[in-house]
Amino acid sequence: QKEVEQNSGPLSVPEGAIASLNCTYSDRGSQSFFWYRQYSGKSPELIMFIYSNGDKEDGRFTAQLNKASQYVSLLIRDSQPSDSATYLCAAPTYSGGGADGLTFGKGTHLIIQP
Amino acid sequence: EPEVTQTPSHQVTQMGQEVILRCVPISNHLYFYWYRQILGQKVEFLVSFYNNEISEKSEIFDDQFSVERPDGSNFTLKIRSTKLEDSAMYFCARWDRSTDTQYFGPGTRLTVL
């Protein structure tokens, strides 16, 4: 049974600081990872995906993948109050590709303090 | 590229009744998914549907559930004989080939009384 683990938080970060969100996964064969943002009462919104070891940057967001440690992280630079949400880490459940059904972590609740 | 739309946004039903939730693709997508999220819990995969057939299904997706694409457009999730514990948000998602990622619809809130 594939597991994706996240600290549920809440994680409180001052506005303008860097928010660091972490995720670990159980299946060493996992190849791709996804970060979704979910506002209360809304659907998950894809913000980053990463397939290779190392860093991937997109605007204020950086995803980091370390397959040896089975660890994925998301950094949010210059945090804004609008970044306050629950951040979900996900990995494919079966074959490893993005077309697979996804296994989600419980999510980390991020609060950006003005 | 836009996601899918879902109808209804909120469905209230009595325990034991059947419900049909609908997902409407914006364009000609191939892969569709149903997920559910019980209030306060994690998003859970139910089923994936490719080329008008079930591709994968989770342990949650038992005989109570079925999916189809009856008219080649709408993608439906049918829940037979609903139970109280079926109350949840149900999300449809579609696969984007160019990025190998999934995009979620706005969801249907199902309340079983």
Image (cartoon, helix red, strand yellow):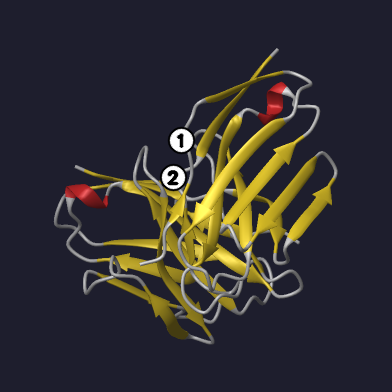
Name the one closer to the observer, A85 or B13.
A85
Category of crowding for the residue at label 1, using alpha-carbon neighbours closer than 10 angstroms: few (below 14), some (14–19), many (at least 20): some
- From the viewer's perspective, is A30 left or right of B83? right
- Report x, y in % for residue A86: 55, 36
Q: Amino acid at mark 2?
A: Lys
Q: Is B93 rendered above or below residue B69?
A: above
> Do residues under tags 2 and 1 come within 8 Å of each other at their CB atoms?
yes
Report whether residue B14 is seen: no
- Report x, y in % for residue A79: 75, 27
Q: Is the same chain shared between marks 2 and 1?
A: yes
Q: Secondary structure at mark 2?
A: loop
Give me the disc on residue A106.
2
Category of crowding for the residue at label 2, using alpha-carbon neighbours closer than 10 angstroms: few (below 14), some (14–19), many (at least 20): many
Q: Amino acid at mark 1?
A: Ser
- Report x, y in % for residue B5: 58, 57
**Residue at 21%, 74% in the rendered image:** B63
Circle 1 residue: A8
Residue B2 falls in image quadrant: bottom right
Instruction: Give the spatial CA distance, label 2 vs label 1.
Output: 7 Å
